[in-house]
């Protein structure tokens, strides 16, 4: 019983320490960038960020999610040549939507986490390319393009009545 109590206190202390460190990082490292920014530095610690970019020459930047989440929609942005995005998660998640015409090259590593990178025009060498690098630890990173749903497809879809 004493061993179980000791282990519970150690685990509780570890989680409390991580939460305190996350709260410190949240105040010390603010996010930079908005809908019109060509370069982003998003930091989501103990909260979430939802951004729809309309950048005219998106060059990339960085995203860091720690016990939080980031959702970025780049479907209205134009991609600059050589665009590179660094993504890092720790017990958090990052979701990035890209337009169907972009190619996404990923060098993202995962440790007890999930990374899902999909682009529709992956084979076109002339397509604008977004390079991803980073790591996911105990979290997830999802990047993808989704074909727009047409009016006919919506009409044919079964309704949930």
Image (spheres, helix red, strand yellow):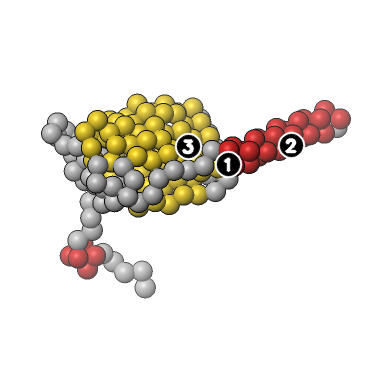
Q: Earlier in the sequence, mark 1 or mark 2?
A: 2
3 vs 1, front mark = 1
Residue 18 x/y as whole percent: 65, 35
- Residue 137 visible in the snapshot: yes
Q: Secondary structure at mark 2?
A: helix
Q: Nearer the viewer, residue 20 or 108?
A: 20
Q: Position of residue 71 (x, y in %)?
A: 41, 48
Camera-nearest residue between 138 and 48: 48
Mark 2 or mark 3, which is nearer the start of the sequence? 2
Spatial separation of the CA atoms under disc 3 and disc 2: 25 Å
Q: Quadrant of the C terminus?
A: bottom left
Q: Residue at x 70, y 34 (%)?
A: 17
Q: Name the residue carrying label 1.
A: 26
- Classed neighbour count for the residue bearing mark 2: other residues with Cα under 10 Å, few (<14), some (14–19), many (≥20): few
Residue situated in front as seen by the camera: 154 or 95 = 95
Snapshot quadrant of residue 81 = top left
Whichever of callouts 3 and 1 sits on the residue coming sooner in the sequence is: 1
Quadrant assignment for the N terminus: top right
- The x and y percentages for residue 110 are 45, 28
Task: Name the residue tied to disc 2.
Answer: 12
Above-or-below relation of 60 to 154: above
Mark 3 or 2, closer to the camera: 3
The residue under the point 35% across, 51% down is 35
Task: Report whether residue 66 is seen.
Answer: no
Q: Which residue is mark 3?
A: 64
Q: CA distance from mark 1 to mark 2?
A: 21 Å
């Amino acid at each position: 019983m004493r061993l179980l109590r000791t282990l519970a206190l150690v685990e509780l202390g570890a989680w409390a320490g991580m939460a305190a460190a996350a709260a410190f990082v949240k105040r010390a490292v603010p996010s930079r960038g908005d809908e019109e920014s060509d370069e982003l530095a998003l930091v989501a610690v103990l909260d979430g960020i939802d951004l729809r970019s309309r950048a005219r020459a998106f060059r990339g930047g960085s995203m860091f999610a720690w016990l939080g989440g980031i959702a970025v929609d780049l479907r209205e942005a134009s991609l600059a040549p050589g665009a590179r995005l660094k993504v890092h998660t720790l017990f958090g998640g990052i979701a990035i939507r890209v337009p169907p015409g972009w190619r996404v090259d990923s060098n993202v590593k995962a440790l007890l986490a999930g990374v899902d990178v999909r682009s529709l025009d992956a084979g076109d060498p002339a397509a604008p390319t977004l390079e991803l690098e980073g790591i996911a630890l105990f979290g997830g990173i999802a990047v993808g393009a989704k074909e727009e749903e047409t009016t006919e497809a919506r009409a044919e879809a079964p309704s949930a009545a």
